[in-house]
Amino acid sequence: MKSQTLKENKDFRRLYYRGKSIASPCLVTYAMKSRNKGNRYGITTSKKIGSAVERNRARRVIRAAFAQLEGDIKGDWDFVFVARSKTSKVKMQSVLSDMQSHFEKLGVIDEKN
C-alpha cells in the first residue's frame, strides 16, 4: 500500500511535539503511531540546506530511501523527515542506512542481522 504525504501544518507540529525523534548527521526522523490506515510521511527542507536544487535533491533522496523501506514497516505510522545540510551531498545509500537504523531504534521495523 502506497503511503500518503503529510501536508497540514498541524500534522507536522503534532509529530514535532509528541513524536519520538532520532537524529543522525544527514537525517532527523520523527515517528508516531497513527490512527489512520496506512503510513503517512512528510519531508522538511529548510533554506539552510542550500539552493532550491539542493533542497529538491535532499527531498528526492529521502523519498527514494523511504520507498525502499516502506514494505518493511509494521503497523500504521506517521513520519516527518528533516533534511540536514549533509543530506543533499551524500549518496542515497547512506540516507537509506541512517533511515533503517532510525526505524529499528524506534521499533517501526524488525531489526535485520
Image (cartoon, rainbow, N blue to C red):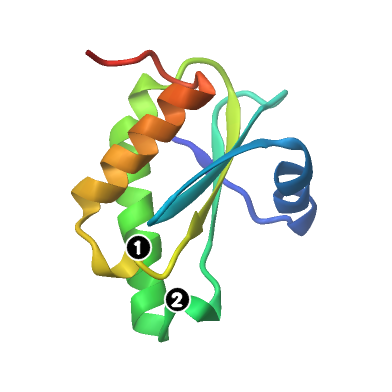
17 w.r.t. 112: above or below:
below
Q: Position of residue 54 (x, y in %)?
A: 35, 77
Q: Which of 45 and 6 is in front in this view?
A: 45
Picture quadrant where residue 46 is located? bottom right
Q: Which of 66 and 20 is in front in this view?
A: 20
Q: Position of residue 19 (x, y in %)?
A: 69, 36
109 w.r.t. 16: above or below:
above
Instruction: Name the quadrant of the C terminus.
Output: top left
Residues at marks 1 and 2, CA–CA distance in whole angstroms = 8 Å
Q: In this view, does 13 lie to the left or right of 83?
A: right
Q: Position of residue 110 (x, y in %)?
A: 38, 13
Which element type, helix, strand or loop, lies under badge 1? helix
Q: Which residue is drawn at 62% across and 23% down?
A: 37
Residue 49's label in the rendered image is 2
Q: Residues within 10 Å of mark 2 (few under 14, many from 20)?
A: some
Instruction: Name the quadrant of the N terminus.
Output: top left
Look at label 2 and name its amino acid: Ile
User: Which residue is the site of mark 1?
Assistant: 87
Q: Residue at x 45, y 76 (%)?
A: 49
- Going from N to C along the chain, the mark reached first, 1 or 2, is 2
Look at label 1 and name its amino acid: Thr
